[in-house]
Image: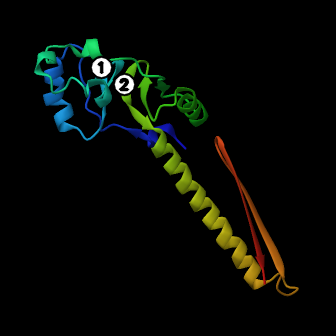
Amino acid sequence: LALEKVIETNFIPINPDMTLKEMLFTAVENSTRNIYPVLDDTQHFLGVVTLDDIRTIMFDQTQYDLKVSQIMHGAPEIIQSSDTMEQVMDKFQSSSAWNLPVCENGIYLGFVSKSKVLSVYRRKLIDFAGVNFRKEIHKWSKGDGEGKLQLFTICIKIELDRFPFLIKIRIEE
């Protein structure tokens, strides 16, 4: 699985010099996401602001002059564009995060969602297991020249980067 295939880019970036009010009306109002990457003018990743971070103050107009730099915090981990999927999953595991930013030389590229990575792996597993299962059943139903088999066991071991799976299916006639 290639990292670039699971990077999501539909996040609205914000600037550390924005006020809370500017952030609310330019990013929060126009986004379907709950996380906002904080970038400088050269697209370097500086941190994040989440809806949870501002939930208690977003309707308090006395807080609207707060700067994003006062609200933002660092990401629990940063995925480098050169990271392997094993390293990516290690970062998700160690941080307990569900979304992590991806950077290349400090430049923000997007976020990777743990649920998207797991969904892609799940689809690959189903596709892989489905193809092998159909092939084996086809062999079984044709027989091997000495008549049909009375008992057939299909054992598929799949190792998709970090996740080993073992599927064993026993078919009796």
Q: Can residue 99 be seen in this view?
A: yes
Count all numbered tags in the image, as a single digit.
2
As drawn, the residue found furthest toward the left would be 61
Mark 2 burial class by Cα count in 10 Å: few <14, some 14-19, many 20+: many
Three-letter code for the amino acid on which mark 1 is drawn: Leu
**Residue 10 % position (x, y):** 30, 38
What is the quadrant of the C terminus in the image? bottom right
As drawn, the residue found furthest toward the bottom would be 147
Label 2, label 1: how far apart the Cα atoms are: 8 Å
Q: Quadrant of residue 106?
A: top left
Q: Is residue 10 above or below residue 160?
A: above
Give the residue pinned by disc 1.
39
Give the numbered dot on residue 63: none
Q: Quadrant of residue 132?
A: bottom right
**Residue 65 % position (x, y):** 14, 14
What secondary structure is found at the residue carrying circle 1? Answer: strand
What secondary structure is found at the residue carrying circle 2? Answer: strand
Q: Nearer the viewer, residue 161 or 16?
A: 16
Name the residue located 61 percent from the left edge and 66 percent from the top edge.
130
**Residue 40 % position (x, y):** 28, 16
Name the residue located 53 percent from the left edge and 32 percent from the top edge.
92
Give the residue pinned by disc 2.
108
In the rendered structure, are the residues bearing label 2 and label 1 in contact, judged by CB atoms less than 8 Å apart? yes
Name the residue located 55 percent from the left edge and 28 percent from the top edge.
91
Name the residue located 19 percent from the left edge and 26 percent from the top edge.
58
